[in-house]
Amino acid sequence: MTRSKLVSIILLVIVSTPLVQNALAVDGYWAFDNITRDQGGRNDVSTTWKTISDTSVAGKTTWKWDPSPNACGQTIESIFSWNVPETMETSKPYNLTVKLEQITNNDCLAVDSWLKMYIGVTDSTTNSDGPSISFGKGNGLVGEKTSEVYGPIHYPNGRSYILAHCSMYQEWYDVKYWYKWVEGTPPKKVEPGATSVVLASTWIVKEYGPMGNYDGVWTRQPGTNTFAASWSGGSITDVIDITSIEGNKIILHRHGNNGDYMGTISPDGTSISGTASWYVPGEEWSVSV
């Protein structure tokens, strides 16, 4: 090989490498897609699971027998809750927080309640799990834990998920949050800092004034700024979106009447109060969590 040909090959490799890297690199992010649920079942255990919200589950299990010599009860009852992000970017850190309230048998060493969460990726060639969070057994099961996880790498034609695995004794309940890959720049999120009322999964809403009083419950769809709203025990329903937050001012859009709620977030971030575009003078609305 001549010296001139060798130099040409080296230059070709140097020039081509960034082009290959750019061709492989894909700008995009993981966006929440849907939820799937599953639960275990044993013929020697009677278990009921109740969906409180898309990020909260209550369970109660009673087993017919317990061979453990340290058994101190045959019923265990717990409430599990957690959080999931609306979008995930590759290799970006996210905090997953889990909460557990064990109502029955929280002092019994023979039984356990725990909530484990992890991020996974599935496609034709990959199935990987991320860090998990677990409360373990015995006393001290009431509490909260947070763990940092990272947005999964994108594989062509792949999907990712966050799995919340709730367990009581030997019974379990899974909620799997599926994410799809979206090319482009992630949308700007509504993240008002430490204002807990805005980030809460459930809003307790009161609307009152000359036109009457209405009590509502607005439940956030997981990982979004959209609420499934109901009033008067479910006899009235609608869909409501957070459309903007600037400082302590918040605007929400109500789909049913194409109107807007305008509110002010309290200094401690625990409540909202304001008016709406269709209200008559003297009418107000408020939110608490």
Image (spheres, grey):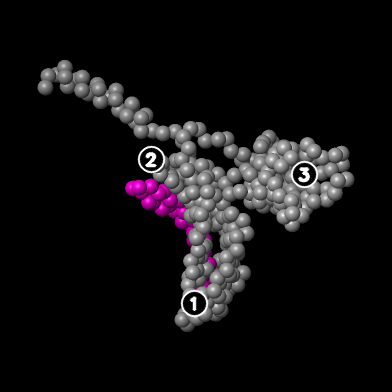
Contact, mark 3 vs mark 1 (Cβ under 8 Å):
no
Q: Is residue 269 magenta?
A: no
Q: Is residue 187 above or below residue 121?
A: above
The residue tagged 3 is 273
* Whether residue 57 is situated above or below residue 251 in the rendered picture: below
In the rendering, which numbered label is found on residue 44? 1
Residue type at mark 3?
Ser
Residue range highlighted in magenta: 109-138
Is 148 in front, or is 276? Answer: 276
User: Where on the picture, by quarter, is residue 192?
Assistant: top right
Asked if residue 107 is positioned above or below residue 85 in the image, the reply reads below
Nearer to us: label 2 or label 3: 2
Q: Position of residue 93 (x, y in %)?
A: 48, 44
Relative placement, left or right, of 109 versus 275 is left
Q: Position of residue 31 (x, y in %)?
A: 51, 42
Q: Are marks 2 and 3 in contact (CB under 8 Å)?
A: no
| Viewer-nearest residue: 170 or 197 | 170
Residue at 76% x, 55% y is 232
- Among numbered discs 3 and 1, the one appearing first in the sequence: 1
Residue at x-position 74% and y-position 38%: 259
Label 2: which secondary element: loop
Question: Alpha-carbon neighbours of circle 3 within 10 Å: few (<14), some, or many (≥20)?
Answer: many
Q: CA distance from mark 2 to mark 1?
A: 44 Å
Q: CA distance from mark 2 to mark 3?
A: 46 Å
